[in-house]
Image: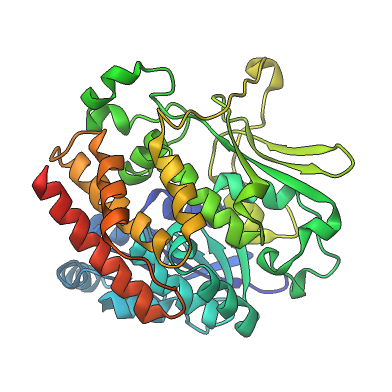
Amino acid sequence: MSQQVGVTVLGSTGTIGVNTLDVLSRHSRDYRVVALTAHRQVERMLEQCRAHKPLVVAMSDADAAERLRGAIVDESLDVEVRAGAEAVAELAALDEAQIVMAAIVGGAGLLPTLSAVKAGKRVLLANKEALVMSGQLMIDAVQASGATLLPIDSEHNAIFQCLPQPADCNAYTPSLQNYAELGVEQVLLTASGGPFRTRPLDSLSEITPEEAVKHPNWVMGQKISVDSATMMNKGLEMIEACWLFNLAAGDIQVVIHPESVIHSMVAYADGSVLAQMGQPDMRTPIANALAWPKRIDAGVEPLDLFKVASLNFEAPDFARFPCLELAYSAHQAGGTSTVILNAANEIAVEAFLNKRIAYTDIPRTIANTLERVVAVPADNLDTILEADSLARETATNEIKAF
């Protein structure tokens, strides 16, 4: 690269954000950290300001921003500090950054991600909820602005790597392609099955938050770890894949693969099945999307096939993973159903982590919320945000009634 490419990291203090900064630090001659955002992790943000010297940072929590501002002044760091959700969305569209890592967890990531897309950035999408909630609205914004939307979730990035690659990368985004015309017949979306894949069904109600956040293969935040255990994460990923790659739900088969070595596969009309394999390390998809179409060092150990030795696959069981079935149903229903699904799940997972409900109450809360909140066409942002708010309120009331 002839000059440094500016990068903004939304959600820099989370797992994806930290891994992104690790990859960027390995290529500091090619990339410059322009802006960072977080919610309330002041100490980690301060450390990142010391190490990466961004021009500006934003904390969505006002009190956290004030504390960070004081620490920045005390250390005489030349970093501007902004506060509030609007500031986070503003930083997503900064002129100085050409690439935006969208790694804010949950529905809070929708508006900043949409801001980056509308600004025509190369958006590295780690926030699956943004597409689950806004779907067509986001894809329309991509087409209107000329933004490039590249997937960071290990499964979606694997699919992306296995799909036909364009001759002109500057005029390409996966969600606007017709892959059926290129011979794609099916996408095989892999899932580890989480920590309870073989646990007796009659003991699922006894699962504790401490057990649920211990993923067997990946190091992730608490919310995503619980979603992986319930396989809601895979349901959201199925919905995201439909929008990312212009596919129908029937084109996507979820496959449980406990080793997490194959990150996903694409089946073609000629009988070929292409798989992307690698260590379960998020730095690989981050580096892939950051430098695409080039390849750069991600700091990840090579895959030792002799150590892996064997690979296993099985079909998901909806009796064990009812959240996955709820996701398929919500996507089929369309409109704001997926908004309601996501909002109810976020409320239920938070309640479970705070030990207010049982593990098996998570799908129960989601199902009841989907039943009580009427879905409408998701044709504008206000409607989407209203559905999100109503679903959160309804899910909260459902939990109180348990």
Residue 49 visible in the current orientation: no
User: Where is residue 25 shown, x and y percent of the image?
Assistant: 53, 55
- The answer to whether residue 185 is seen in the rendering is yes
Q: Quadrant of the N terminus?
A: bottom right
In the image, is 205 to the left or to the right of 112?
A: left
At 24% from the left edge and 56% from the top edge, which residue is drawn? 43
> Looking at this view, is 101 or 351 the one in front?
351
Residue 86, position as x, y percentages in the image: 31, 80
Q: Quadrant of residue 151?
A: bottom right
The answer to whether 233 appears left or right of 24 in the picture is left
Q: Which residue is drawn at the image coordinates 26% and 49% (left, top)? A: 368
Closer to the camera in the image, 369 or 234: 369
| Quarter holding residue 207 | top left
Task: Find residue 79 and report its horizontal and vertical position in percent.
Answer: 34, 75
Q: Which x, y percent locates residue 299?
A: 59, 42
Q: Nearer the viewer, residue 110 or 92?
A: 110
Q: Is residue 3 left or right of residue 321?
A: right
The quarter of the displayed image where residue 280 is located: top right
Q: How is the image coloured?
A: rainbow
148 versus 20 height, above or below: below
* Residue that protrudes farthest toward the right in the picture: 270
Q: Is residue 67 left or right of residue 115?
A: left
Residue at (29% x, 61% y) in the render: 46
Vertical placement of residue 267 versus 215, above or below: below
Q: Quadrant of the C terminus?
A: top left
All told, the count of numbered labels is 0
